[in-house]
Image (cartoon, helix red, strand yellow):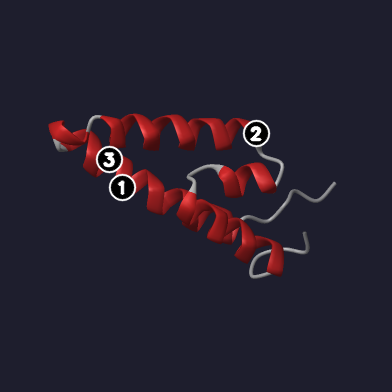
Amino acid sequence: MSGQGSGGNVIAALCNIFFPGLGQLVQGRILSALIFAIIVFGGYALWFLLIPAIVAGIFHIWAIIDAAKYTPPRY
């Protein structure tokens, strides 16, 4: 991927809208994909407790923004 705003980042952000963590997985960041997916799905599963659902919503938005703004490290 060429960097922030590239087509790959847009695709990754769109993937995150439908499945949290998928965008990070598309970018090759497995650990962050797992963390986002576990927190978001766990929070949404506990929707009846309200606070975990709010935290999950915040992490869901964070995952989308993280995928859109990701720039790979330069070696």
Q: Do the CB atoms of the residues marked 1 and 3 lie less than 8 Å apart?
A: yes
Label at residue 30? 2
How far apart are the two marked residues, 1 and 2, measured between alpha carbons?
21 Å
Please state which of residues 46 and 75 is positioned toward the viewer in this rendering. Answer: 46
How far apart are the two marked residues, 2 and 3, measured between alpha carbons?
21 Å
Secondary structure of the residue carrying tag 3 is helix
Q: Amino acid at mark 3?
A: Val
Q: Amino acid at mark 1?
A: Gly
**Dot placed on the residue nearer the N-terminal end, 2 or 3:** 2
**In the displayed structure, would residue 11 be above or below residue 37?**
below
10 vs 38, left or right, is right
Please state which of residues 45 and 39 is positioned toward the viewer in this rendering. Answer: 45
Which residue sits at x=46%, y=56%?
17
Q: Quadrant of residue 1 in the image?
A: bottom right
Q: Quadrant of residue 5 in the image?
A: bottom right
Write down the residue under mark 1.
Answer: 57
Write down the residue under mark 3.
Answer: 55
Please state which of residues 60 and 2 is positioned toward the viewer in this rendering. Answer: 60
Q: Residues within 10 Å of mark 3 (few under 14, many from 20)?
A: some
7 vs 40, left or right, is right
